[in-house]
Image (cartoon, helix red, strand yellow):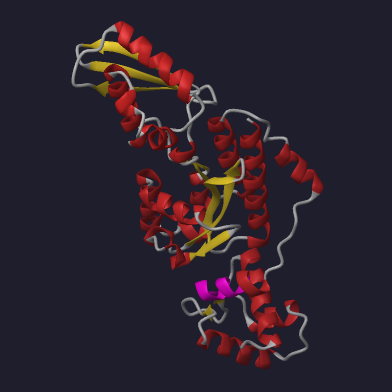
Amino acid sequence: MMNERSRILLKSLIEKHISDGQPIGSRQLAKSSGLELSPASIRNIMADLEETGFIASPHASSGRIPTPRGYRFFVDSLLTVQPLDSIELHQIEDQFRPDSADRLITTASQLLSNLTQFAGVVKSPSRHSTSFRRIEFVSLSDKRVLLIVVTPDGDVQNKVLDSSRKFSDSELVEATNYLNQNYAGMSFDAIKSRIQTELKKLKENISQLMTLAISAGEENAFKAEEYIVSGEKNLLSVPDLSTNIDSLRTLFDMFDKKTGILQLLDTSDRARGIQIYIGGESGLVPLDECSVVTAPYEVDGKIVGTVGVIGPTRMAYERVIPIVDITAKLLSGALSQS
């Protein structure tokens, strides 16, 4: 159990290191902590904090910096989150007017990046929540059919389907009309669960085309970018990261490949509220020197995606956390009204 003096000194050390970016010595702490302790007493407490893994001494410096364990204790037990001022809050709110999902997600990603000067990420709504407003089948060749899907946002997405036989124009029109009249507004997953017993009763052409459409939907054929990232180049200007070119290269490779980030954001999807991953807690090697702050967002009360900020472990958590939190809430509201 950490005593009160140790907590105060650790909090003061981390806050000053976040602000200045330099190792913090005992004389600096004596001035900034507000404790009436001699530098010698402070050195003893710092030695205990170093021994227990909360701070470390980089290179030959006499000062100390926080470790990931120190940051974790700071975030969980010592941090005082600052609410955004009313002017900044109104500026953020003005960005979220009802609009298409794609544009709102891009806005959220750019806003997170601009406000924090780190990388802003937004995971797109999961396909299970995606529905269609209209669907249409168009003949391309003997056994190829173009499936056209219009989403509720007005986006038009196409998929070429390979069928086992040629469909006449009248069959395609009949299937198009049947699907639009009976299933418009539903997701492909919802349609699949509903029509298991209906397929046998339908005309062969409608049944076959419906099966092809559902298979395409299940394959995520209409999914655009699975997450949007903005401001990743901001990380090139972060001193804590920019000095290690190999780490930066690995980090940007991860942004390109997307798999690792998506796994992390998927984990955040399943959690309520703000999640903070510090250093190696993410389980992703490229993020060992980074922290990730995430929050889920909803559509009509159901969690469908995640917003987040990726930056150095030395970030102003008290500011980044409320920015991520309010962005998730405003995105939820705008998407639910769209």
- 32 left or right of 184? right
- 226 left or right of 14? left
Q: Is residue 71 magenta?
A: yes
Which residue is at 59% across, 36% downward?
107
- Of residues 230 and 99, the one nearer the viewer is 99
Which residue is at 40% across, 63% downward?
283
Using the image, determine if residue 107 lies above or below residue 207. below
Which residue is at 46% across, 63% downward?
289
Q: Where does residue 337 sit, x and y in percent of width and height?
A: 66, 33
Instruction: Please say whether residue 185 is visible from this viewpoint.
Output: yes
Using the image, determine if residue 79 lies above or below residue 163. below
Using the image, determine if residue 54 lies above or below residue 172. below
Q: Where does residue 216 sit, x and y in percent of width and height?
A: 33, 30
- Of residues 213 and 331, the one nearer the viewer is 213
**Position of the C terminus by quadrant:** top right
What is the quadrant of residue 225 in the picture?
top left
- Of residues 88 and 33, the one nearer the viewer is 88
Instruction: Please say whether residue 119 is visible from this viewpoint.
Output: no
Which residue is at 47% across, 58% downward?
241
Q: Where does residue 108 sit, x and y in percent of width and height?
A: 59, 40
Q: Main secondary structure of the magenta part?
A: helix
Magenta stretch? 66-74
Q: Is residue 168 magenta?
A: no
- Of residues 185 and 40, the one nearer the viewer is 185
**Position of the N terminus by quadrant:** bottom right
How many marks do you count on the picture? 0
What is the quadrant of residue 104 in the picture?
top right
- 173 left or right of 312? left
The residue most toward the right is: 86
